[in-house]
Image: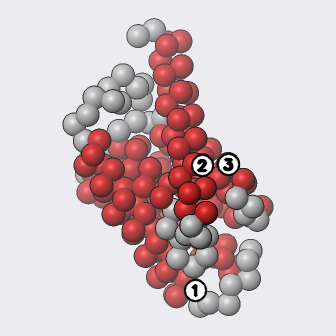
Amino acid sequence: MNNSSNRTTYLTMAGLVAALYVVLTYVANAMGLASGAVQVRFSEALTILPVFTGAAVPGLFVGCLLANLLTGCAFWDIVFGSLATLIGAIGTRYFGRKMPILAPVFPILANMAVVPIVLQQVYGSTDSYPFLLFTVGLGELISCGLFGGILYHALKGRRIFEHTPC
């Protein structure tokens, strides 16, 4: 593949990941699962994708940014929630490829570090920080750990990401 074709493939894959993230967030949002103390965003299962392709890192960031913007999140939630997803995706990319069992840990921890603070400071949640830490962690464990693990095993060994650069 030439350089132009590599860039096109990378951008296409990143765009697909972003679009899928938005759609899956909308589905969870319609079911009342995408916000609040316990957030089970189906889209967070996609945080496993950086194990397979580097294009998933910007795709997840842009997808989270757009999903948060389009579902009516507050400005600081859009900013910090998207950054938490980016940090989690970078951790998954660099450490999850070596030890896939650890891949979900990075988005879980990144969201546990950021989302409780956002819930308290931006949305005025009166729940205690330890309670929010637990509930956000539980939601992320379901989304990233359980659903992401299922997605990982479904994609492992497939040649779908074989020609994606990075």
Distance from disc 1 to disc 2, alpha carbons, whole Å, reads 28 Å
State which mark lies toward you, 1 or 2: 2
- Screen quadrant of the N terminus: top left
Residue at 57% x, 34% y: name it: 15
Q: Which residue is mark 2?
A: 22
Q: Nearer the viewer, residue 37 or 105?
A: 37
Q: Residue furthest top?
A: 2
Distance from disc 3 to disc 1, alpha carbons, whole Å, reads 27 Å
Label 3 vs 1, first from the N-terminus: 3
> Answer yes or no: do the residues labelled 2 and 3 have beta carbons within 8 Å?
yes
| Quarter assignment of residue 34 | bottom right
What label sits on residue 66 in the rendered view?
A: 3
Q: Residue furthest front?
A: 31
Residue 71: x percent and y percent? 70, 58
Label 1 vs 2, first from the N-terminus: 2
What label sits on residue 79 in the rendered view?
A: none
Q: Which residue is mark 1?
A: 129
State which mark lies toward you, 2 or 3: 2
Q: Looking at the image, is 145 positioned above or below residue 92?
A: below
Residue 124: x percent and y percent? 74, 83
Three-letter residue code for mark 2: Val
Three-letter residue code for mark 3: Leu
**In the image, is 1 to the left or to the right of 31?**
left
Q: Looking at the image, is 56 positioned above or below residue 48?
A: above
**In the image, is 100 to the left or to the right of 14?**
left
Can residue 143 be seen here? The reply is yes
